[in-house]
Amino acid sequence: MFEKIKYWDEVKDYLFITLGIMMYTVSFTVFLMPYQIVAGGVTGFAAIIDYATGFHIQNTYIIINMALLVVALKVLGFKFMFKTIYAIFLLYFMLIVAQDIIPKQPNGYPIKLLGEGQDFMSMVIGCIITGLALSTVFLHNGSTGGTDIIAAAVNKYHNVSLGTVLIAIDFCIIGSCMFFPQFGTYLERAHKVMFGLCVMTLENFSLDYVMNARRESVQFMIFSNKYQEIANAIGMETGRGVTILDGHGWYTGKEMKVLCILAKKRESTDIFRLIKFIDPNAFVSQSSVVGVYGEGFDEMKVRINKKLEATKHKHKHLET
C-alpha cells in the first residue's frame, strides 16, 4: 500500500510539473515575447540574446542549463535533479513547438495577442501566469532549471525565500540590457530595463504568494468539556499532534483542559468539522502562525555556528 501511494505521488509530481511548464511556455511566448519584454532567469537571459542577436531562445536556454546541471548535481539530490532535467528538456521542446504553432509577426516573433501598445497589460498577465507556473513546478519538487537551480540550492540550506534569491539574480540579468547597443539608445535600454524590473517584481511576488499560501500554518486553541474525544478524533483523522494544557477559568474558577494544535491552513476545515460534530458548543480560537518547523512542517534551514558547537563540546566535557 505504501509503495502504491509513493508511486502515485511521483506520478502526480510529474503531471503538475508538466502543467506548470505548459503554463510557463504559453505565458512567455504569448504575452512576453511578442512585445520583446525582458525577464529574469535563464529563459529571460536567452530572450535578451534572441532580441539582440537573433540566436534562438531555446538554444541559449539549453546550453546554459546543461552547464548549470553539471555544477548543481553536487548540491541537489538526484531525485530533484531528475525532475529538473525532465522540466528543462520539456520546456526546451515546448518553446520550439509554441513558436512554430503561434502565428508570426513580420519580425518573426509571435503575434501581439492584446494588440499594439498593450505592452504593460501583456506584461502583467504574463507575469502572473509565469509566477503561478513556477510555483506549481516548485511545489512538486521540480525546477525549470537555470536560476531556479541556484535558488533551490540556497533555499535547501538557508531560510531564504525562493523569490528573494531569484530577485537578486534577475536584477543582474535584466541590467545586462544596458550593454546591448542593439536595443537602441541608452534611454531606450533604460526603458527596457525598467520594464524588466516590473516583470521581476510581479513574477516573484506571484511565486512567493502561492508558495507561502500553500505552506501557511494555523494554531488552534480549543476549550471543551469533550476535549478527550476531540483530541482523539483530530489525532486519528488528521494525523496532527495534540497538546493538552491545564487551564483555569478566571470568572468560573473552574479547572479545565485546553487543546493546542498546529496544522496546515488547508486542514482547518476538517478540524472545524470534527470539533462541531463532537461538541457544537466548544470555544475555538484560530490564529495564523508565521512559521512552524519540525516533523510534519518545514525544516529549520539554519546552520549551527562554530561558537555554539564549541559551547556544546565544552558542556559535554564538563559533564564527563
Image: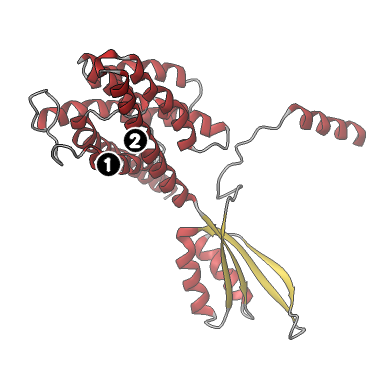
- Label tally: 2
How far from the left and from the top, in percent, is residue 111? 12, 33
Q: Is residue 23 above or below residue 45?
A: below
Q: Is residue 272 above or below residue 185?
A: below
Q: Which residue is mark 2?
A: 199
**Outermost residue, bottom side:** 252
Q: Is residue 265 above or below residue 82?
A: below
Mark 2 lies on a secondary structure that is helix
Please name whichever residue, 132 or 224, is drawn nearer the observer in this view of the structure.
Answer: 132
Label 2 amino acid?
Answer: Val
Marks 1 and 2: which is nearer the front?
2
In what quadrant of the picture does the C terminus appear? top right
Label 1 amino acid?
Answer: Leu
Q: CA distance from mark 1 to mark 2?
A: 22 Å
How far from the left and from the top, in percent, is residue 52? 24, 16
Image quadrant where residue 40 sits: top left
Please name whichever residue, 162 or 192, is drawn nearer the observer in this view of the structure.
Answer: 192
Crowd tier of the residue under label 1, counting other residues whose Cα lies within 10 Å: few below 14, some 14–19, many 20 or above: some
Q: Which residue is mark 1?
A: 19
Image quadrant where residue 232 sits: bottom right
How far from the left and from the top, in percent, is residue 247? 73, 74
How far from the left and from the top, in percent, is residue 177? 33, 20
Residue found at x 46% / y 26%: 150
Q: Is residue 280 left or right of residue 9?
A: right
* Marks 1 and 2 close (CB-CB < 8 Å): no
